[in-house]
Image: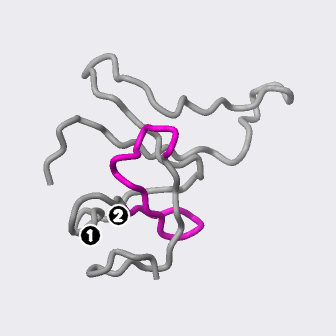
Amino acid sequence: MRLTAHVWLCFACFASGVDAQLPANTLPQLPPRQWTDIETGHRIVRLSDEGGSATLYFHDTAYSQEGDKFIFNTPSGLAVLEVAAIGTPSQKIQILLAMSATTRKPL
């Protein structure tokens, strides 16, 4: 699959607890949903706010056959995103049990 825009996908894992050295009223801040890497100029988009989210293992196909859907792991289950919507306000994560390779519908 070939994308015209270079989009680097970022999965941020966040600690569930507060650092013991921080004052009690100071909460850890989440990074922004997207930013541009100063050194490379690549746009980075955080796909999920859920800690523990991760890409599939390198030999697992994370894209649908048409390349329009991206699948990744979350603690809630497998999640799917529309590739064209990544980094836009319409970006929505759908949790699914499985996805049919032929119909591309969640099972």
Q: Position of residue 24 (x, y in %)?
A: 86, 30
How much space separates mark 1 and mark 2, taking CA atoms? 6 Å
Q: Is residue 81 positioned above or below 96 on the image?
A: above
**Image location (x, y in percent) of residue 83:** 34, 51
Going 34% across and 29% down the picture, which residue do you hit? 43
Nearer-the-camera pick, 78 or 15: 78
Left or right: 54 in relation to 63: right
Mark 2 is surrounded, within 10 Å at the Cα level, by few (under 14), some (14 to 19) or many (20 or more) other residues, namely few
Judging by the rendered image, the residue that carries numbered circle 1 is 60
**Is 78 colored magenta in this rendering?**
yes
Asked if residue 69 is positioned above or below residue 2 in the image, the reply reads below
x and y percentages locating residue 2 in the rendered image? 13, 48
> Which residue is rendered at x = 29% and y = 37% of the image?
7
Of all residues, the one furthest to the left in this rendering is: 2
Count of all numbered marks drawn on residues in the image: 2
Marks 1,2: beta carbons within 8 A:
yes
Q: Nearer the viewer, residue 78 or 89?
A: 89
Q: What's drawn in magenta, residue-wise? A: 71-90
Screen quadrant of the N terminus: bottom left
Q: Which residue is mark 2?
A: 56
Between 85 and 20, the one lying in front of the other is 85
Residue at 30% x, 63% y is: 62
Q: Quadrant of residue 18?
A: top right
Amino acid at the residue labelled 2: Leu
Residue 95 among those drawn in magenta: no
Please state which amino acid type lies under the numbered disc 1: Asp
100 vs 31, left or right, is left
Residue 65 sits in quarter: bottom left
- Asked if residue 2 lies left or right of residue 72, the reply is left
Q: How is the image coloured?
A: one colour
Q: What percent of the width, then of the height, locates residue 35?
A: 43, 25
